[in-house]
Amino acid sequence: MKNFQYYNPVKIVFGKNTIKEISKLLKGRKKILFLYGTGSIKKNGVYDQVKEALKNFIFIEYGGIQANPDYTDCMNCVLLAEKENVDFILSVGGGSVLDAAKFIAAAYYFKGDDPWDILKGRGKIDKALPVGSVLTLPATGSEMNSNSVISRREIGEKLAFSHPLVFPEFSILDPETTFSLSKHQVANGIVDSFIHVLEQYMTTDIGTPLQDRQAEAVLLTLIEEGPKAILNNKDYAVQANIMWCSTNALNGILGCGVDQDWATHGIGHEMTALYGIDHARTLAVIMPGLLSFLRKQKEEKLLQYGERIWGISMGDSNVRIDEAIARTCLFFESLGIDTRYTDLDIEEDAPEKIAARIDARRDVLGEKRNIRGPEVIKILRNLK
Ligand code: NZQ
Ligand code: ZN
């Protein structure tokens, strides 16, 4: 096992009717920035619940954070937060609103010339406004991690940063808030969570049986509960399980002491920046090709995954690996998610364009740092 440090200060408040807890959690705060997205919380009753919980606080609202949150909106919020002298940001929505809140929190105190440097990995963060969240879409794990992903449409970029000062102070997870999600969004969340687990699990085997089994527990639960959620996402028990799976998929615990391969996310962010495709839908067309391309490097884990998750124990390694990848694709497809980039409505030379962006950035991806532009093309075109 590799050396690691694990730190996670997020207080999780999970369950029915928990939004009212905000009033206790925000005690002592003087002025709150209540941040939300493009309207879903006004339709599903979450907005009213939050307003009720905030009735004894001074707060200002900013609605309109879009999916794949944009840098320009975030910077407008920084100006608003400065003008209004807020001392807390409350994010209400999915991962996009929360990622925006985290970036605003860091940019608020940023001393450098250009806050975009935070996302380019060059900006030093010494202080951030505290953030809390009410999560309405299980997918990203942002509610219990210190990551934030921001898009800048004017220059066609999508970049991430991570810093311990932007862990949410608390996250409220009420599964009932997810009842208003569309099937499309439910499926996206399941696939995003599944792939977060795979990126920490499907690497080189370095002898981490506890982490492997923790990861497998999340995968198996998503496989069991996912189809139920697609059929009916108003079943509280199912939504509660999916929600807790998503949080556990990316709160850092599965990544302790293991090799990690975030190439699928690295390539996926470029695809979203170029073509505006939903985050999870990019991942589902990249991961199968990546597993096939790196089958030798990941052989032990692929075989273990095939056997423990899909019950595949017969045949030679290549046959078993092919079947494990095929079963993964079938699972995504059963949720309504395509698994080949040719299924997406994008230009024929998309793989070359994405590869060029990765090379221009001199990015080298994967747990063995062996994925550059040429390998990205092979992964997307599913070539050996
Ligand atoms: O705009 P609103 O009204 O909020 O509507 C949203 C949005 O249209 C809607 N929605 C959210 N909750 C709903 C709802 N609709 C009905 N009922 C509800 N309860 O769903 C749409 C998508 O929301 P969004 O927040 O964009 O989805 P998600 O949570 O999947 O977040 C995606 C963003 O997170 C980043 C992605 O790259 C993308 O920018 N990620 C963040 C990570 C992190 N912070 O750790 C890790 C992930 O890998 C990911 O990269
Ligand atoms: Zn993701």
Image (cartoon, rainbow, N blue to C red):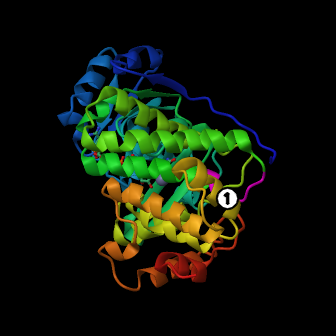
Q: Where is residue 282 in the image (x, y as percent from the top left)?
A: 42, 64
Q: In this view, does 53 lie to the left or right of 124?
A: left
The residue that mark 1 highlights is 203
Position above or below: 88 against 94: above
Residue 173 visible from this viewpoint:
yes
Q: Quadrant of residue 45?
A: top left
Q: Where is residue 51 in the image (x, y as percent from the top left)?
A: 27, 23
- Seen from the viewer's position, the closer of residues 346 and 231 is 231
Q: Where is residue 205 in the image (x, y as percent from the top left)?
A: 74, 55
Who's the residue at 72% across and 43% down the image? 209
Mark 1: which amino acid? Thr
Who's the residue at 62% across and 59% down the image? 302
Task: Give, as a single range, the part of the protein colored magenta.
Answer: 200-206
Q: Is mark 1 on a helix, strand or loop?
A: loop
- Seen from the viewer's position, the closer of residues 77 and 152 is 152
Q: Does the magenta stretch include residue 203?
A: yes
Most extreme residue toward the left is 43
